[in-house]
Amino acid sequence: MDARAKTGVSIRSATKRYGPVVALDDVSLDIAPGEFVSLLGPSGSGKTTLLGILGGFVQPTSGAVWVGERDITFAPPHKRDIGIVFQNYALFPHMTVGENVAFPLRARRQPKSGWAKKVAGALAMVELSGYESRNISQLSGGQRQRVALARAMVFEPQLILMDEPLSALDKQLRETMQIELRRLHRKLGATIVNVTHDQREALTMSDRVAVLKDGRLAQIDTPERLYDRPCDAFVASFIGEATLLNVSRAGDDAVRLGDAVLRTAHPLPRGENLLLAVQTEKLVIDGTDAPNGAQTNRLSCRVTEVLYQGESLRVFAALADGTAISLRQPGSHEARRRIPSPGAHMTVALDPQDTIVVPA
């Protein structure tokens, strides 16, 4: 890739209104050169609108977009030097692989004498060397996805945008391509902005994830911090598989859940309306893989249901006051042997590092 691809992006107070409807509300975001950022959120959160503003397909009502030192806020799409991978790939079925990849070069009227070398280089990057003469109909879903990526890269853009490029693939291929795209990103060093509604996909591929809600930026962070330190109840419930439980303050580093006092290793939010965000895999059955030490939090509960889900088991339980909790355990025979039957009592443990409290 050309050094130009390693160009940062700055979105400054971007807002988009459609009459009384605010699709995007004062979003500011800086993306470092060579960074892979995913825009994540439910339908109507503003992630597709933000990608459209970056690509030039949507004009903001206010705000600005800079790529490097260039203000591209109102530049048309074909003058933005941006590569785009669409959700359905948008490949031309009547063209060969090579002709599809060469299309951006033709559209930009680059010298035809250099097309073959650039097409070959782009296909080599996605490990499709020698596929130039293949018809699109001869390719698998994963190969078509890589052709679309090669087409987005062939003219050495400053920025690559991806609009849910893996959503059309089956689960196994989608997970394989997530790892492949992550590997390609490390190899290319390109600046990439990806839109997805799949939390696992965002966590797998991204350097940072921007979570949007109702047109606003809720939190942007690394996958680890986003998962382990959500800023509020929405992010905690949207990322992963969390149970949100009402708790009350029981000191500077502890909260009360029913009769139990749980200590946390993190500062408590301000205010009195607090929620404990418990990711299902962070709870463990006491006496199995439970954390050691006197500071470990423990809760007594009664098993209400056990669901076998292949690689794991989802265990539902109720605290003494009826509060419902759930945990996820490995699906191994040994783990299954240790899980009590419905109706039985058990104790679960939660490490203070995993005791996350967010504002209600």
Image (cartoon, rainbow, N blue to C red):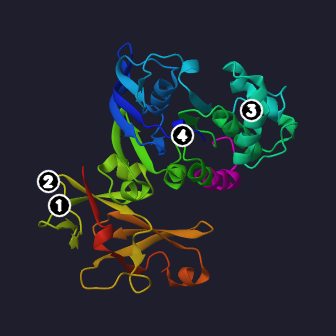
Q: Is residue 118 above or below residue 347?
A: above
* Residue highlighted by disc 3: 101
Q: Is residue 250 above or below residue 219?
A: below
Of discs 4 and 2, which sits in the foreground?
A: 4
Q: Earlier in the sequence, mark 4 or mark 2?
A: 4
Residue 224 placement: quadrant: bottom left
Hey, what amino acid is under mark 4? Ala
**Residue at 32% across / 74% down in the picture?**
351
Instruction: Please name whichever residue, 68 or 333, is drawn nearer the observer in this view of the structure.
Output: 68
Q: Nearer the viewer, mark 4 or mark 3?
A: 4
Q: Secondary structure at mark 2?
A: loop
Question: Where residue 116 appears, x then y in whole percent?
Answer: 79, 33
Q: Position of residue 23 (x, y in %)?
A: 40, 24
Mark 3 or mark 1, which is nearer the start of the sequence? 3
Q: Using the rendered image of the protein, determine whether residue 309 is visible from the camera's viewpoint.
A: yes
Disc 4 + disc 3, Cβ < 8 Å: no
Residue located beneath label 1 in the image: 248
Q: Looking at this view, is 178 or 159 the one in front?
A: 159
Q: Identity of the amino acid at label 2?
A: Glu
Q: Which mark is residue 272?
A: 2
Q: Nearer the viewer, mark 2 or mark 3?
A: 3
- Is 180 magenta? The answer is yes
* Mark 1 burial class by Cα count in 10 Å: few <14, some 14-19, many 20+: some
Which secondary structure lies at badge 3? helix
How dense is the environment of label 4, judged by Cα within 10 Å: few (below 14), some, or many (20 and up)? Answer: few
Q: Amino acid at mark 3?
A: Val
